Image: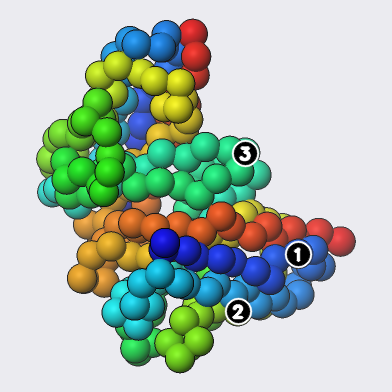
């Protein structure tokens, strides 16, 4: 099973600042990586697939990059609605596996 | 508007069974692979199982193999998860999710709100 490791576990950021989230795979997943945003009591929301392909209606302040084992999700200027938990997921091998999540909280 | 609505969650004793349902609307249900993903209390997301458009190909995470069965009824736009021999560690919110890609292993592009399963005596 491919282990996905996200860092940091918690990121404290002020509104308007930049947030950079990392995701590392225990072996190469090529570009078979997705990012999700999850708020308490809500359905998770797809942000990116293919490491950098934007989901429908995703604001331009979000960007995804990386391939192989190292991936990054960047939010250029945090808005109030962006405070949430973010997960990466690989779908290169079975089973699909998620990282443990990065909580982006208000500083 | 695309919607996925889960139902069937509840409290069940260890060793018991439960069947979850998910109804999809706003898209052609029969064209898509579908998945179940769960989240235990205070934990992250865990993919559980998925099924192809015709119900002929299924994949499971090892921890549920032999205990859970995924199925679908395209005439009813419905996805099911039959769970047997439930354990305390199966306690979680279970999400129904649509697979976004054309291959068996892909991302999930739309998710339901989830249904809570609690396994406890």
Residue B63, x across and y down, in percent: 52, 64
Residue occupied by mark 3 = B42
Tell me the chain of label 3: B
Residue occupied by mark 2 = B82
Q: Which numbered mark, 3 or 1, is in the foreground of this view?
A: 1
Is label 1 in contact with label 2 (beta carbons under 8 Å)?
no
Distance in Å between CA atoms under marks 3 and 1: 18 Å
Name the disc covering residue B10, or none. Answer: 1
Q: Residue B61, located in which quarter of the rendered image?
A: bottom left
Q: Secondary structure at mark 1?
A: strand
- Lateral position of residue A13 relative to residue A35, left or right: right
Residue B108, x across and y down, in percent: 35, 58
- Lateral position of residue B77 relative to residue B68, left or right: left
Exactly how many numbered labels are in the figure? 3
Q: Which residue is at 16% across, 41% downward?
A: A52
* Sequence-first disc among 3 and 1: 1
């Amino acid at each position: 099973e491919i282990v996905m490791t996200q860092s940091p576990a918690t990121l404290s950021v002020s509104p308007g600042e930049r947030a950079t989230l990392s995701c590392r795979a225990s072996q190469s997943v090529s570009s078979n990586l997705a990012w999700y945003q999850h708020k308490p009591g809500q359905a998770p929301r797809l942000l990116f697939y293919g490491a950098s392909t934007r989901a429908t209606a995703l604001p331009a302040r979000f960007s995804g990059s990386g391939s192989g084992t190292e991936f990054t999700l960047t939010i250029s200027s945090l808005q109030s609605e962006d405070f949430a938990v973010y997960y990466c997921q690989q779908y290169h091998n079975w089973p699909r596996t998620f990282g443990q999540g990065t909580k982006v909280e208000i500083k | 508007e695309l919607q996925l609505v889960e139902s069937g969650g509840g409290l069940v004793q260890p060793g018991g069974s439960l069947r979850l349902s998910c109804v999809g609307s706003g898209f052609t249900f029969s064209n898509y692979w579908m998945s179940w993903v769960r989240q235990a209390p205070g934990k992250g997301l865990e993919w559980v199982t998925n099924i192809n458009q015709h119900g002929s190909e299924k994949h499971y995470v090892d921890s549920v193999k032999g205990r859970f069965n995924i199925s679908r009824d395209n005439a009813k736009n419905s996805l099911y998860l039959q769970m047997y021999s439930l354990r305390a560690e199966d306690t979680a919110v279970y999400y129904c999710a649509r697979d976004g890609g054309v291959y068996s292993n892909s991302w999930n592009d739309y998710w339901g709100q989830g249904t809570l399963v609690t396994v406890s005596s």
